[in-house]
Image (spheres, grey):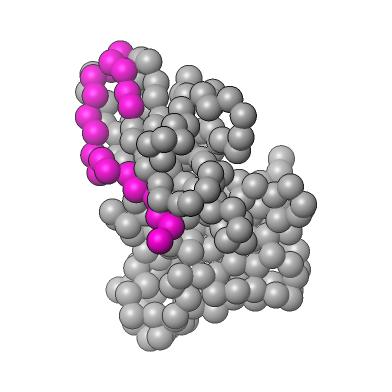
Amino acid sequence: AQSVTQPDIHITVSEGASLELRCNYSYGATPYLFWYVQSPGQGLQLLLKYFSGDTLVQGIKGFEAEFKRSQSSFNLRKPSVHWSDAAEYFCAVVFTGGGNKLTFGTGTQLKVEL
Amino acid sequence: DGGITQSPKYLFRKEGQNVTLSCEQNLNHDAMYWYRQDPGQGLRLIYYSQIVNDFQKGDIAEGYSVSREKKESFPLTVTSAQKNPTAFYLCASSIARAGDTGELFFGEGSRLTVL
């Protein structure tokens, strides 16, 4: 079955530390991959996306993500976290051939300690 | 500025009442979506529409209804048949034409509380 998993429900990091949020998917082909961020009580904002080509993609706010086909993963990274990065992060996947509908992971809540 | 506008931002409802959440977009997008968000469950698709006068059920359509009479508008009605309507509702849109990759643009959400 097609699915997307974010194994970490909560993550806490210190300001200035590096960050990696995990995302795994289950699918027989390469899907379209996205990371969105949501501040409390707000809508979702697109951080970055991967469709094809270079497997390391750069996004807004200093975030990057790497697609690893062998691991069916699309982990989000940031070298140095700022307090304003505290939010909820969602990995999302379009399983091509499924009508281009976006399927979301359950999200990872990031807390940043000062 | 182009974007998606949801209203109201907060809404309180008594049990047994229907309520309608508004979603308007000026991005000239063909497709529009309604998601429900509950803590720890991510976003779940309620309904979506790819063209005017047509819409499809998503994963959790029971107790909800929609209409798509205009390209710009996709209102969601939460009916009294929805057993647990308290949630955060998000509207989104996408291009849905050739080359569409499924990227969504979101409104700021409407929080519905049933008293």
Question: Where is the C terminus of chain B found, in terms of image quarters?
Answer: bottom left
Does residue A73 appear left or right of residue A50 in this picture?
Answer: left
Q: Is residue B53 above or below residue B26?
A: below
Dividing the picture into quadrants, the one containing residue A52 is top right
Instruction: Please count the marks in the image.
Output: 0
Q: Which residues are magenta?
A: A1-20
Viewer-proximal residue among B85 and B60: B60
Q: Residue at x 39, y 80 (%)?
A: B82
Q: Is residue A33 visible?
A: yes
Q: Residue at x 39, y 21 (%)?
A: A78
Viewer-proximal residue among A26 and B105: A26
Q: What percent of the width, then of the height, locates residue A6?
A: 32, 44
Q: Is residue A71 above or below residue B71?
A: above
Q: Residue at x 44, y 80 (%)?
A: B62
Q: Is residue A31 magenta?
A: no
Q: What percent of the width, then of the height, locates residue A80?
A: 36, 15
Viewer-proximal residue among A112 and A65: A65
Does residue B87 appear left or right of residue B76 in this picture?
Answer: left
Q: What percent of the width, then of the height, locates residue A51?
A: 60, 38
Q: Is residue A15 magenta?
A: yes
Dividing the picture into quadrants, the one containing residue A15 is top left
Q: What percent of the width, then of the height, locates residue B4?
A: 63, 51
Question: Where is the N terminus of chain B found, in terms of image quarters?
Answer: top right
Does residue B108 appear left or right of residue A79 in this picture?
Answer: right
Q: Is residue A43 above or below residue B13?
A: above
Q: Residue at x 33, y 80 (%)?
A: B83
Q: Is residue A40 visible?
A: no
Dividing the picture into quadrants, the one containing residue A9 is top left
